[in-house]
Amino acid sequence: MARAAPVTSATPRPAPADRSDAVLSRLQLLVTRKLDGLLQGDYVGLLPGPGSEAGESREYRPGDDVRRMDWPVTARTTTPHVRRTIADRELETWLAVDLSASLDFGTGRWLKRDVVVAAAAAITHLTVRGGNRVGAVIGTGGGAPPAGRRRGAPPAAGPGVLTRLPARSGRREAQGLLRAIAGTELRPGRGDLGALVEMLNRPPRRRGVAVVISDFLAPPAQWARPLRKLRVRHDVLAVEVVDPRELELPDVGVLPVVDPESGELHEVQTADPRLRRRYAEAAAAQRAEISAALRGAGAAHLRLRTDRDWLLDMVRFVAAQRHTRTRGTTR
């Protein structure tokens, strides 16, 4: 079961400009009210920048970056130490936003594409302060597959459409970037998540933060290597967007579904408990493979669901990241 995610047969809908502006206005108010309470201290952000100015040392803890080992202190104390670095005051953050056709789906409180835009808005809000620059690359499908294409027919060709938005500082520029993301039309056909991530590797950029927002339904073999390469120079955050129907099927009888990326049409008998069990097992295995690939790439992993309060999940993630980065610090 290569893609254990049902998708509705509704055709992709472009986001009108007025709807996008209204959504972004509500998101900005919501994010500001909920997240500003976390942003206290010398530097704020979803993931603190790797920095370049040397700070104090502390004892090594499992999970610390071995590239920051403080060898003189380690040799002097015979105990492994790592050198903390003070975050750069001007951080460059790049978003890789996957808006392939599989994101135009949702059975919870939101569509997956709405959660993608919301996550991009929250991350931009958290990183745009203090003259920091934010840029984005956006990927979507490459062409329309035949309507109602039956299983076994060849999938739609094309690597998808990739768009780069240059990194700029300032809230006005950040709002323009978010409007461009929210206003991107979801095109049917296959996208290429690997090529989207690779756009953040070329040309090489100064150390900063790279955020990949996707449902990661593409095979890990397509995107895991570019993600590992990205982690060599940057702190990487992977935001995985999930719908509950991608994890389990409800018992609703015969359910016709169509994959908007390939156009494959299926009729699924959801009343069969064995089929629902196999589906849940395949979906769990798929998500475990995604998590393992992200962990192997060294990326921080945040999962947002369409049936939950995505903002609360993000607040908890930010708090956990801050706790992890500050625990055991020498005072």
Image: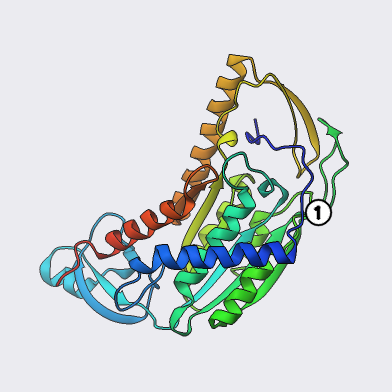
Is 238 situated left or right of 215 in this image?
left
Quadrant in the picture for the C terminus: bottom left
Is residue 47 among the parts visible in the rendering? no
Q: Position of residue 170 (x, y in %)?
A: 54, 83
For disc 1, the neighbor class at 10 Å (few under 14, some 14 to 19, many from 20) is: few
Is 256 situated left or right of 131 in this image?
right
Quadrant in which residue 249 is drawn: top right
Report the residue at 78% width, 54% height from top: 187
Quadrant in which residue 6 is drawn: top right
Q: Nearer the viewer, residue 142 or 244?
A: 244
Q: Position of residue 294 (x, y in %)?
A: 49, 50
Report the residue at 67% width, 60% height from top: 195
The number of callouts visible is 1
Q: Which residue is labeled 1 in the image?
A: 158
Is residue 107 among the parts visible in the rendering? yes
Q: Position of residue 221 (x, y in %)?
A: 61, 47
Report the residue at 50% width, 56% height from top: 238
| Three-letter code, disc 1 | Gly
| Rendered view: 44 above or below 303 | below
| Rendered view: 93 above or below 222 | below
Q: Secondary structure at mark 1?
A: loop
Report the residue at 62% width, 19% height from top: 275
Is 13 situated left or right of 238 in this image?
right
